[in-house]
Amino acid sequence: MTEKSPPVLTHHTQMLIRRKMFAACQQIAKECGLALQDRSRIKNAIDLSFDVAFRVSICDSDGNAFNPEKERFGLIATAYGLSPSDYGRIFETRGEQFRIVGIEPRRPKYPVSVERVSDCQRFKFATENIKMFLSKADR
């Protein structure tokens, strides 16, 4: 008798499952007149399980999911020498790409929140560094 080995949740399999779950949940949210955002973070430490997170929210005037982080960023970005349009911008440092996802005023030393594009891992950056990275990205 041969034992069947347990399935391994590869990165590809995790992404496929997450996309299918998101599509199903998105349909339900749409039927209710709401919007859905994928808030999952990929962690590949052990391929035995993974977390899925979605945010259900009202729609903004464009029909997109209302994003409180984006709204807050738009309101206070100029106080940090950034532009409201910098939200969501991608920059590169140390060979990796990062996306700007917020500002946290209670962190004066590292107020800018970013996430690594490859796995959505979040990091905190100083405003001066962000301005430097964005100016390099504009060149």
Image (spheres, rainbow, N blue to C red):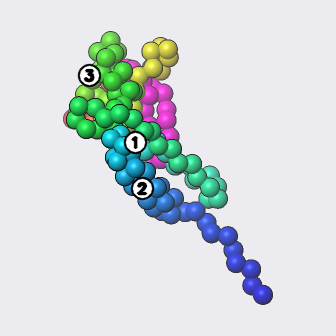
Q: Quadrant of residue 81?
A: top left
State the residue position of label 2: 24
Looking at the figure, which quarter contains the N terminus? bottom right
- Indicate which disc residue 37 carries: 1
Of labels 1 and 2, earlier in sequence is 2
Crowdedness of circle 2 by 10 Å Cα count: few (<14), some, many (20+)?
Answer: few
**Whole-number angstrom distance, CA of label 3 to CA of label 2:** 35 Å
**Whole-number angstrom distance, CA of label 1 to CA of label 3:** 23 Å
Q: Is residue 8 above or below residue 139?
A: below
Q: Is residue 16 above or below residue 77?
A: below
Tell me which segment is drawn in magenta: 112-130
Identify the secondary structure beneath mark 1. strand
In this view, the residue in front, 6 or 90, is: 6
Residue 4 appears anywhere in the view: yes
- Whether 118 is among the magenta residues is yes
Mark 1 vs mark 2, foreground winner is: 2
